[in-house]
Amino acid sequence: MHDKPIVATENLKKHFVIEESLLTKYLAGAKDRVVRAVDGVSIEILPGETLGLVGESGCGKSTLGRALVGLYEPTEGSVLFQGKPLRGQGSIPKTALRRQAQIIFQNPYSSLNPRHTVRQIIGVALAARGVQPQDREAETIDLLRRVGLSEDHIDRYPHQFSGGQRQRIGVARALATNPKFIVADEPLSSLDVSVQAQIINLLQGLQKEYDLSYLFITHDLRVAYHMSHRVAVMYLGQIVESADTDSLYENPLHPYTQALLSAIPSVDVFPRGNRILLEGTVPTPIDPPKGCRFHPRCRYRMPVCEQEEPDLLPAETQMKTGEVKRSTKIGKKTQHLVRCHLHMG
């Protein structure tokens, strides 16, 4: 049974400053603007668990994922990896973090150096793990076979592969350092549906083989359902709902989650009612709405929603006994959390 999270954040914030030109500041009195990409996120991911992170484009999913593996330095809050902070006193060494935490990028072509062969691409990761030069070819061939490629591919360049094959190379590169945690940043979005199913099966098989933990970022809730033990729904830089996968899909509590799930084509796995159409578009993270950030688009909005920002708190769910199966496979049943005034006592 795993109780201690492999990755955890506490009130994590990542803001980007958009600097105005000196002329604009002088003539128009403009001030620098702040993009609140991630604005107070607290999550935990257990060893061997997949946390699905879903939400519309621009809500901060990729920024959060990159902060978890140390590619972005937090503006506020903290990221803990195996109980150690990424920065500051007592932090995990950067070399150890690079080996134990990896990322699979969304675009399988732009994330691979077009001037390097597969041998060179994976060899860099193997060198970071400390594999001796004379052993790297055998290790590379073994990794290629594990992701469904052959040793004949070792001296080819990225442009000589299909999109699905390039993504497999990205997976092999991530595995080369023998990591414990991988951020999969929309790894299926640029692939055909048939290839998506192959990559899903590959990632699930590798998770069992290597006891991997995933943060699986996607905008496709069907994929999140099949991949995740738990799902967190993100909106405008904040987590608005989090629960075991079955709990969330059977009993979505936040109006935003309800709208996302209603857009899934109706099939037996997760039948939906009528489509819920959201008003307007996602507000800008430069100037998020006051109070509940979702209230301008919410069909249930109340006066309090415009004034007070709700906290992410446990909610009572109506799941039947035995329906929650996924998180129990990793030894822990988690609470159903929701950020909504409708569910505050």
Image (spheres, rainbow, N blue to C red):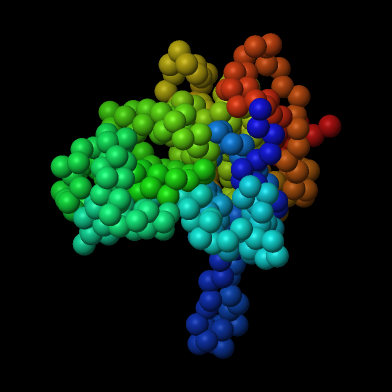
Q: Please identify the quadrant where the N terminus is shown.
A: top right
Q: Quarter-wise, where is residue 129 in the image?
A: bottom left
Count of labels shown? Answer: 0
Report the residue at 65% width, 32% height from top: 2
Is residue 40 at all visible to an observer of this figure? no
Instruction: Tell me where residue 297 appears, x and y as whole percent.
Output: 60, 42
Front position in the image: 303 or 170: 170
Give the answer, above or below, for where 83 lies relative to 51: below
Looking at the image, residue 160 sits to the left or right of residue 337; the answer is left
Residue at 75% x, 43% y is 310
- State which quadrant residue 164 falls in: top left
Residue at image location 53% in from the left, 71% down from the top: 18
Residue 218: in sight, yes or no?
yes
In the picture, the quarter occupied by the C terminus is top right
Which of 133/209 is in front?
133
Residue 194 screen position, x and y as percent: 28, 28
Give coordinates of residue 4: x percent, y percent. Answer: 68, 39
Q: Residue at x 29, y 39 (%)?
A: 142
